[in-house]
Image (cartoon, rainbow, N blue to C red):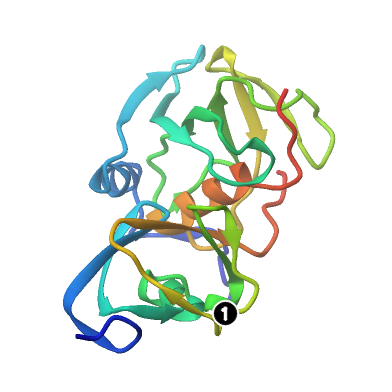
Amino acid sequence: MNQQGGKGEKSIEYTVNGELQTTSERKLSVKAILEKAGFTPASEYDLTRDNGDHLFQDQDEEVPLHKGESFTATFRGPTPTS
Amino acid sequence: MSVQVGVDDQMTADGLEAYLSGFGMLVERENDVNGNEYSVVRDYRILHGGLAGKTCDVAIQRVSTTPYILPAAIHTRPVLVAMDGAEPLSTLASPLGPDWQYWSRRLDRPPTPQVIWTHIVTVLNDDRWKPA
Protein backbone atom coordinates (compact mmCIF):
# COMPACT_ATOMS: atom_id res chain seq x y z
CA MET A 1 0.00 0.00 0.00
CA ASN A 2 1.36 3.34 -0.99
CA GLN A 3 1.02 5.89 1.80
CA GLN A 4 3.53 8.50 0.74
CA GLY A 5 3.81 9.89 -2.76
CA GLY A 6 2.90 8.30 -6.04
CA LYS A 7 -0.51 7.01 -6.96
CA GLY A 8 -2.71 5.38 -4.36
CA GLU A 9 -5.76 3.26 -4.94
CA LYS A 10 -8.27 5.77 -3.65
CA SER A 11 -8.83 9.31 -4.72
CA ILE A 12 -8.53 12.20 -2.31
CA GLU A 13 -10.94 15.08 -2.36
CA TYR A 14 -9.79 18.53 -1.27
CA THR A 15 -10.76 22.09 -2.06
CA VAL A 16 -9.05 25.20 -3.36
CA ASN A 17 -11.02 28.39 -2.72
CA GLY A 18 -14.02 26.17 -2.11
CA GLU A 19 -13.84 24.35 -5.43
CA LEU A 20 -13.73 20.60 -5.06
CA GLN A 21 -10.65 18.89 -6.46
CA THR A 22 -9.85 15.20 -6.76
CA THR A 23 -6.55 13.40 -7.15
CA SER A 24 -5.22 9.90 -6.87
CA GLU A 25 -1.88 11.27 -5.72
CA ARG A 26 -0.93 11.26 -2.05
CA LYS A 27 1.32 14.25 -2.52
CA LEU A 28 1.27 17.12 -4.96
CA SER A 29 3.57 20.07 -5.34
CA VAL A 30 2.20 23.49 -4.53
CA LYS A 31 2.48 24.32 -8.21
CA ALA A 32 0.51 21.21 -9.17
CA ILE A 33 -2.24 21.96 -6.65
CA LEU A 34 -2.63 25.42 -8.16
CA GLU A 35 -2.49 24.29 -11.76
CA LYS A 36 -4.90 21.38 -11.30
CA ALA A 37 -7.37 23.84 -9.81
CA GLY A 38 -7.04 26.17 -12.80
CA PHE A 39 -4.73 28.76 -11.29
CA THR A 40 -2.36 29.33 -14.16
CA PRO A 41 0.29 30.45 -14.40
CA ALA A 42 0.84 29.18 -10.87
CA SER A 43 3.58 31.73 -10.36
CA GLU A 44 0.89 34.43 -10.15
CA TYR A 45 -0.70 32.86 -7.07
CA ASP A 46 0.07 32.04 -3.46
CA LEU A 47 -1.28 28.92 -1.81
CA THR A 48 -2.13 28.70 1.87
CA ARG A 49 -3.17 25.56 3.74
CA ASP A 50 -6.27 26.57 5.67
CA ASN A 51 -5.55 24.22 8.55
CA GLY A 52 -2.77 25.95 10.41
CA ASP A 53 -2.77 29.05 8.19
CA HIS A 54 0.38 27.89 6.43
CA LEU A 55 1.54 29.91 3.44
CA PHE A 56 3.75 27.81 1.18
CA GLN A 57 6.91 29.67 0.21
CA ASP A 58 8.22 27.20 -2.36
CA GLN A 59 5.99 26.12 -5.24
CA ASP A 60 8.08 22.98 -5.67
CA GLU A 61 7.33 21.85 -2.13
CA GLU A 62 5.53 18.51 -2.02
CA VAL A 63 2.37 18.73 0.02
CA PRO A 64 0.86 15.61 1.62
CA LEU A 65 -2.85 15.63 0.85
CA HIS A 66 -5.53 14.57 3.30
CA LYS A 67 -9.19 13.92 2.68
CA GLY A 68 -11.26 17.04 3.08
CA GLU A 69 -8.28 19.36 3.23
CA SER A 70 -8.79 22.91 2.10
CA PHE A 71 -6.48 25.49 0.59
CA THR A 72 -6.77 29.15 -0.27
CA ALA A 73 -5.29 30.56 -3.46
CA THR A 74 -4.69 34.28 -3.62
CA PHE A 75 -3.51 36.45 -6.47
CA ARG A 76 0.03 37.79 -6.04
CA GLY A 77 -0.59 40.82 -8.19
CA PRO A 78 -2.26 44.05 -7.17
CA THR A 79 -5.93 44.45 -6.38
CA PRO A 80 -5.98 48.13 -7.28
CA THR A 81 -8.48 50.62 -6.02
CA SER A 82 -10.67 52.18 -8.67
CA MET B 1 -5.44 45.84 -32.53
CA SER B 2 -6.67 46.90 -29.13
CA VAL B 3 -6.88 44.51 -26.21
CA GLN B 4 -9.64 45.02 -23.69
CA VAL B 5 -8.55 44.14 -20.20
CA GLY B 6 -11.10 42.98 -17.69
CA VAL B 7 -13.82 41.89 -20.07
CA ASP B 8 -15.05 38.51 -21.23
CA ASP B 9 -17.99 37.96 -23.54
CA GLN B 10 -18.76 34.54 -22.00
CA MET B 11 -19.09 35.78 -18.45
CA THR B 12 -22.45 36.71 -16.90
CA ALA B 13 -23.76 37.61 -13.46
CA ASP B 14 -25.84 34.44 -13.56
CA GLY B 15 -22.72 32.43 -14.36
CA LEU B 16 -20.96 33.83 -11.33
CA GLU B 17 -23.88 32.92 -9.09
CA ALA B 18 -24.01 29.40 -10.54
CA TYR B 19 -20.28 28.96 -9.99
CA LEU B 20 -20.48 30.00 -6.34
CA SER B 21 -23.61 27.96 -5.65
CA GLY B 22 -21.90 25.02 -7.29
CA PHE B 23 -19.50 24.58 -4.42
CA GLY B 24 -21.97 25.16 -1.68
CA MET B 25 -22.04 28.90 -1.17
CA LEU B 26 -25.44 30.36 -0.40
CA VAL B 27 -26.03 33.12 -2.94
CA GLU B 28 -28.99 35.45 -2.68
CA ARG B 29 -30.03 38.79 -4.14
CA GLU B 30 -30.33 42.21 -2.52
CA ASN B 31 -31.04 45.68 -3.85
CA ASP B 32 -29.34 48.91 -2.86
CA VAL B 33 -31.04 52.23 -2.20
CA ASN B 34 -30.88 53.05 -5.90
CA GLY B 35 -32.57 49.84 -6.97
CA ASN B 36 -29.39 48.17 -8.24
CA GLU B 37 -29.35 44.42 -7.76
CA TYR B 38 -26.49 42.50 -6.14
CA SER B 39 -25.41 38.89 -5.82
CA VAL B 40 -24.77 38.27 -2.15
CA VAL B 41 -22.64 35.41 -0.84
CA ARG B 42 -23.77 34.60 2.67
CA ASP B 43 -21.49 33.81 5.57
CA TYR B 44 -18.09 33.79 3.90
CA ARG B 45 -15.49 32.95 6.53
CA ILE B 46 -12.18 34.74 6.19
CA LEU B 47 -9.42 32.29 7.07
CA HIS B 48 -6.21 34.23 6.61
CA GLY B 49 -4.70 37.66 6.99
CA GLY B 50 -5.63 40.42 9.37
CA LEU B 51 -9.33 39.61 9.33
CA ALA B 52 -8.92 35.87 9.92
CA GLY B 53 -11.83 34.45 11.87
CA LYS B 54 -14.34 37.03 10.65
CA THR B 55 -17.46 35.96 8.81
CA CYS B 56 -19.18 38.30 6.39
CA ASP B 57 -21.63 38.56 3.56
CA VAL B 58 -20.03 39.61 0.28
CA ALA B 59 -21.93 41.43 -2.44
CA ILE B 60 -21.13 42.14 -6.07
CA GLN B 61 -23.39 44.32 -8.15
CA ARG B 62 -25.09 42.40 -10.91
CA VAL B 63 -24.54 43.81 -14.38
CA SER B 64 -25.89 42.69 -17.71
CA THR B 65 -23.27 44.29 -19.92
CA THR B 66 -21.94 42.36 -22.89
CA PRO B 67 -19.10 41.78 -22.63
CA TYR B 68 -19.28 41.44 -18.88
CA ILE B 69 -17.37 44.04 -16.89
CA LEU B 70 -16.99 43.48 -13.16
CA PRO B 71 -18.05 46.54 -11.17
CA ALA B 72 -15.01 48.03 -9.45
CA ALA B 73 -16.13 47.36 -5.89
CA ILE B 74 -16.97 44.62 -3.47
CA HIS B 75 -19.28 45.12 -0.52
CA THR B 76 -19.15 43.37 2.83
CA ARG B 77 -21.51 43.10 5.77
CA PRO B 78 -20.66 43.81 8.48
CA VAL B 79 -18.21 46.67 8.25
CA LEU B 80 -14.88 44.89 8.63
CA VAL B 81 -12.26 47.63 8.62
CA ALA B 82 -12.12 51.37 9.18
CA MET B 83 -13.98 53.54 6.73
CA ASP B 84 -11.04 55.18 5.01
CA GLY B 85 -11.28 56.53 1.51
CA ALA B 86 -7.50 56.70 1.21
CA GLU B 87 -5.36 53.82 0.00
CA PRO B 88 -4.67 51.12 0.82
CA LEU B 89 -8.13 50.57 2.32
CA SER B 90 -10.24 52.74 0.03
CA THR B 91 -13.41 51.85 1.87
CA LEU B 92 -16.61 53.86 2.00
CA ALA B 93 -20.20 53.58 3.05
CA SER B 94 -22.13 51.26 0.77
CA PRO B 95 -25.42 52.02 -0.97
CA LEU B 96 -26.57 48.62 0.28
CA GLY B 97 -27.09 50.10 3.74
CA PRO B 98 -25.42 51.28 6.92
CA ASP B 99 -24.30 47.81 7.94
CA TRP B 100 -22.46 47.36 4.66
CA GLN B 101 -18.99 48.50 3.59
CA TYR B 102 -17.87 49.42 0.07
CA TRP B 103 -14.35 48.36 -0.92
CA SER B 104 -13.15 50.16 -4.01
CA ARG B 105 -11.34 47.47 -5.97
CA ARG B 106 -10.73 47.06 -9.69
CA LEU B 107 -10.18 43.75 -11.45
CA ASP B 108 -7.68 44.13 -14.26
CA ARG B 109 -7.82 40.56 -15.52
CA PRO B 110 -10.35 38.92 -17.80
CA PRO B 111 -13.28 38.06 -15.51
CA THR B 112 -14.13 34.42 -15.17
CA PRO B 113 -16.08 33.20 -12.15
CA GLN B 114 -12.91 31.74 -10.66
CA VAL B 115 -10.90 34.92 -11.28
CA ILE B 116 -13.63 37.04 -9.69
CA TRP B 117 -13.96 34.81 -6.64
CA THR B 118 -10.18 34.69 -6.22
CA HIS B 119 -10.10 38.49 -6.50
CA ILE B 120 -12.58 38.70 -3.61
CA VAL B 121 -10.70 36.10 -1.57
CA THR B 122 -7.43 37.96 -2.17
CA VAL B 123 -8.85 41.30 -1.06
CA LEU B 124 -10.42 39.93 2.13
CA ASN B 125 -7.55 37.65 3.19
CA ASP B 126 -4.96 40.42 3.10
CA ASP B 127 -2.38 40.62 5.90
CA ARG B 128 -2.60 44.40 6.01
CA TRP B 129 -6.13 44.76 7.35
CA LYS B 130 -7.00 45.37 10.97
CA PRO B 131 -10.53 44.77 12.26
CA ALA B 132 -12.66 47.88 12.73
The spot of residue B30 in percent (x, y) is 39, 20
Q: Position of residue B90 (x, y in %)?
A: 76, 35
Write the residue at 64% across / 26% down.
Answer: B80
Tally the numbered discs.
1
Residue that lies at the very extreme toward the right in this rendered image: B86
Residue B76 visible = yes
Residue that appears at 75% across and 33% down? B130
Residue B63 percent coordinates (x, y): 42, 38
Please give the chain letter of the residue carrying mark 1.
A
User: In the figure, A33 relative to B65: above or below?
Assistant: below
Find residue A26 and report its image quarter.
Answer: bottom left
What type is the residue that disc 1 sits on?
Answer: Gln
Q: Quadrant of the N terminus of chain B?
A: bottom right
Q: Secondary structure at mark 1?
A: loop
Q: Is residue B9 left or right of residue A73?
A: left
Query: Where does residue B24 sit, x and y in percent of width and height?
Result: 26, 42
- In this picture, residue A18 sits left or right of residue A39: left
Q: Quadrant of residue A61?
A: bottom right
* Quadrant occupied by the C terminus of chain B: top right
Front residue of this view, candidates A40 and A22: A22
Residue corresponding to mark 1: A59
Q: Nearer the viewer, residue B72 or A34?
A: A34
